Image (tube, rainbow, N blue to C red):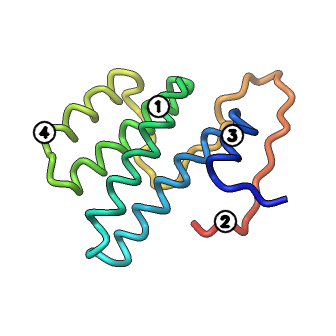
Amino acid sequence: MCLNNEEAMKTYPEKGILLLDLARYHIMTVQRDEKLKDIGLPLAEEAINRYLDSEPILLLKAYALGCLANIKSGMGDNKGAEELIEKAKAIDPYFSEAFGVPPLILFAEPDEISHYHAYFLRPF
C-alpha cells in the first residue's frame, strides 16, 4: 500500500516530523534551480507551518523556526527572518542550525526505551 503525504499524515500523525523533511525537499529543489524559488519556498514554508501547528516539542519547534527563518530570508523578508531567529533563540539559545532534522531519539529520556529507526537511503 502506497500512501501520499496527506494520507500518511492522517494515518500516522506521530510522524509529523516528516513535514520537516518535505520542507527540506522543497528547499533543495530551489537550491538546484533558482527559477523554482517562487514555488518551492512557499511550499517549504507551508510544510513547516503545518509542522509548527502540530505543537512539536520545544527543541524541535526552535529548529523549525530556524528553518522558517532561512526560508523567509530566501524570500527577501529579512525582518521576518530576524524575528523568527529571536523566537527560536528564546526557546533554545543553542538550537540546531544544521540542515538535517535532529532525530527524536536525541530528546528521549535516558531511561526511555526507544524504538527509533533510521535508514541511510534517504535522499538527503
Q: Nearer the viewer, mark 4 or mark 3?
A: 3
Which residue, given by chain and number where applicable, does mark 3 sit on? 15
Task: Give yes or no for contact between labels 1 and 3 (Cβ–Cβ under 8 Å).
Answer: no
Residue 74's x, y, as percent?
A: 23, 57
Q: Quadrant of the C terminus?
A: bottom right
Number of the label disc, if any, that sits on residue 122: 2
* Marks 4 and 3, the one that precedes in the sequence: 3
Q: Amino acid at mark 2?
A: Arg
The residues bearing labels 1 and 2 have C-alpha atoms spaced at a distance of 23 Å
Which image quadrant for residue 30? bottom left
Q: Which residue is mark 1?
A: 52
Residue 107 appears left or right of 92: right
Q: Are marks 4 and 2 in contact (CB under 8 Å)?
A: no
* Front residue of 34 and 1: 1
Q: Residue at x 40, y 45 (%)?
A: 46
In the rendered image, residue 8, in percent from the top left (x then y), is placed at 70, 46
The residue carrying pointer 3 sits among few (fewer than 14), some (14 to 19) or many (20 or more) residues within 10 Å by Cα, namely few
| Label whose residue precedes the other's in the sequence (1 or 3) | 3
Query: How much space separates mark 4 and mark 2, taking CA atoms?
Result: 33 Å
Marks 4,3: beta carbons within 8 A: no
Residue drawn 41% across and 26% down?
Answer: 92
78 to the left or right of 68: left
Nearer the N terminus, badge 4 or badge 2?
Answer: 4
Splitting the image into 4 quarters, where does residue 103 fall?
top right
The residue wearing badge 4 is 79
Secondary structure at badge 2 equals loop
